[in-house]
Image (spheres, rainbow, N blue to C red):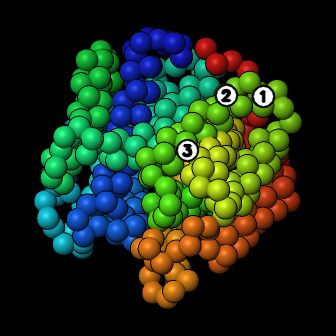
Amino acid sequence: MGKKNLHSGTYLRMCAANTLVCTYIFANFTLLCVRPGGSVLLCGLALAAFAVGMYVPGPFNAYLVERYARKSIYLKSLLLLLLLNWAFACPLPASLLIAAAGMQGLVFAIAQNALGNTMVNDLLTSERRTAGDNLYSWYGRLGLPFGWAAALLLPYVGLSGHAQMQWLSAVPCAVAFLLILSLSVPLKAPVQTSLFSTDRFWLGKAWPLFLLAFAAAALEGIVTAWGFIAPGGPLLSRALYMGLGFLLALWLQYVVFLAAENRAEMVAGVVLMAASFFLLSHPHEAVRNNAAFVLAGAGVGLLSARSLMYFLKLAGHCQRGTVQNTYMLAWRTGFAAGFLLPPLLPAPSGGVPGGVAYPSGLPTLLLVCSLLLLFLLLLGYLLGVHPWFEHHKDRSFKFRTVG
């Protein structure tokens, strides 16, 4: 595979495959919320199982991609993801659905290790890898609003049964399979490596960044869960406006913050998230369902993108795949933890919330928890993580080239 730039068709197809697979995954979780017998709590438990499943193949990551063809690993992983879709299409008990989500997390982690942590970096020249990994991550980040919206749009295409909608939700994953199947990737000679290792799995020294990303992802999980729970507005509009916020954050990163002081992007993300939480209790429905989710998407986008940059700039020689996987585990674990918080908090009228018992605004307890987490995130970042990073970083923080 020749070294290419960020505008090559091969690289863009890999990025598109990342978006499509993430769209499929989040469409699955959305359908768990709206299916007969489904709930936000069930979705949260499935997300937790998904996150746990992602840790299982970690010790084997290096062995798999060094011993076998990376393209083959990725394609076989997508076939398993498509096969697991059968479980979600069946009227299985909640325990089996949660177990299937855990299996999906395991297979998804293998797929990301093969494509995002390995093939993409093999494709790009060394000076373009940071920008390339950042952009690849942005393509995957859009899978949340895309999958959320796609699942909610399925009833509008004439489908009446849950099984039909579940099978149609697998189309993005099938398209991703075809995109990568058509790529020409030279075979790589097998490299002798141990079966178990932390290589491409876990970078122990990055634990401060892990906590930072975990907290930021928990905020994304809280907002997303509230998007399903809150009454008084269409779920679809919340998904679309959150996606708009992600696109706004992408523009801000590449235009406004490209040459800004290192801490500006993180601080701006925290401010935008705080504003979104206050707007979720605004008396006007349009503000609660539109503006609040735009700001949430923009805040999450800035926090997630800058967190990834910290991981990438901490990585030493041959540690890029390891830090990418560590970041992915932090983000998915934090998102699951945050998503579980709203359905586990008691509703104002007592019991476990399902949406009906809530007033139109964000409950005081959830608002206080979210703002406290934001405060701890900002304080820990400014006083702890950033000074620690400046002392331990491996290379210059900024990336200047995007092509």
Q: Quadrant for residue 39, please give it.
A: bottom left
Residue 335 in the image, given as x and y percentages of width and height: 52, 59
Q: Secondary structure at mark 1?
A: helix
**Residue beneath the point at 50% across and 61% down:** 232
Instruction: Quarter of the image for the N terminus: give it.
Output: top left
Q: Is residue 135 above or below residue 303?
A: above
Nearest the viewer among 133 and 144 is 144
**Residue beneath the point at 29% across and 15% down:** 184
User: Crowding at label 3, few (<14), some or many (≥20) Cα neighbours within 10 Å?
Assistant: many
Q: Secondary structure at mark 3?
A: helix
- Which residue is label 3 attached to? 242
Task: Calculate the distance from the C-alpha at mark 2 to the C-alpha at mark 1.
Answer: 8 Å
- Which residue is label 1 attached to? 256
Task: Calculate the distance from the C-alpha at mark 3 to the C-alpha at mark 1.
Answer: 20 Å
Q: Secondary structure at mark 2?
A: helix
Which residue type carries mark 2? Trp
**Residue beneath the point at 21% across and 69% down:** 96
Which residue type carries mark 1? Val
Which of the numbered marks, if any, corresponds to residue 289?
none
Is residue 25 visible in this depiction of the protein? no
Q: Is residue 187 above or below residue 133?
A: above
Which residue type carries mark 3? Met
Residue 163 in the image, given as x and y percentages of width and height: 15, 52
